[in-house]
Amino acid sequence: MWPEKIFEGDFTQIYVRIQTVMYHTVKLFSDSGIDVVVEIVLLAPYNALKELTSLLQNYSVLLVHVTCSIEELHRRETECGDREHGQAESQLQYLVPQDTYDLTVDTLFSSVDDCADKIIQLARCPNQWTAFKKLSMQTSVD
């Protein structure tokens, strides 16, 4: 998703700008009545969660935590071949939220189809989506 030239400048500044544009794009689609699925790693150093919850605090958001073991992260990084070894593991300490999700799926123990089925099942029950609202309240106080 990232062009090579992004690594030539101030990565943090570019990263934050791209994240902001993406959040506003999600809001634009939502305001147009279009459901959006966003795959993203939210990292604390960039205030990603605070900005996202501020922008979408009045929207229905389903938060899904997709996880697997550290060993599996390493194996997948090696298999992909386009990531620095250990990158995913190094980001875990900065992952936000750490523990507030509507659903957690483990891709080591469940197939992609099983994970998708669990997400779809919960997606049909928006009254059960509470994690984002909790996070919105927490980040508005911080």
Image (cartoon, rainbow, N blue to C red):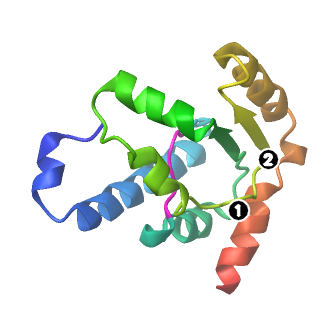
Indicate whether 67 appears above or below 133: above
Q: Which residue has dot 1 on it?
A: 58
Q: Position of residue 94 (x, y in %)?
A: 52, 63
Label 1 residue SS? loop
Circles 2 and 1, Cβ within 8 Å, touching? The answer is no
Indicate whether 84 appears above or below 123: below
Part of the protein shown in magenta: 38-43
Residue 42 included in the magenta stretch of the image: yes
* Residue at horizontal 70 percent and vertical 69 percent from the top: 136
Indicate whether 10 appears above or below 23: below
Q: Nearer the viewer, residue 108 or 111?
A: 108
Distance between the alpha carbons at the discs numbered 2 and 1? 17 Å
Q: Which residue has dot 2 on it?
A: 102
- Which quadrant does the C terminus fall into? bottom right
Q: Please count the marks in the image.
A: 2
Q: Nearer the viewer, residue 131 or 36?
A: 131
* Residue at horizontal 78 percent and vertical 33 percent from the top: 123
- Quadrant assignment, res 53: bottom right
* Residue at horizontal 65 percent and vertical 61 percent from the top: 97
**Mark 1 Cα-neighbour bin, 10 Å: few <14, some 14–19, many ≥20:** few
Label 2 residue SS? loop
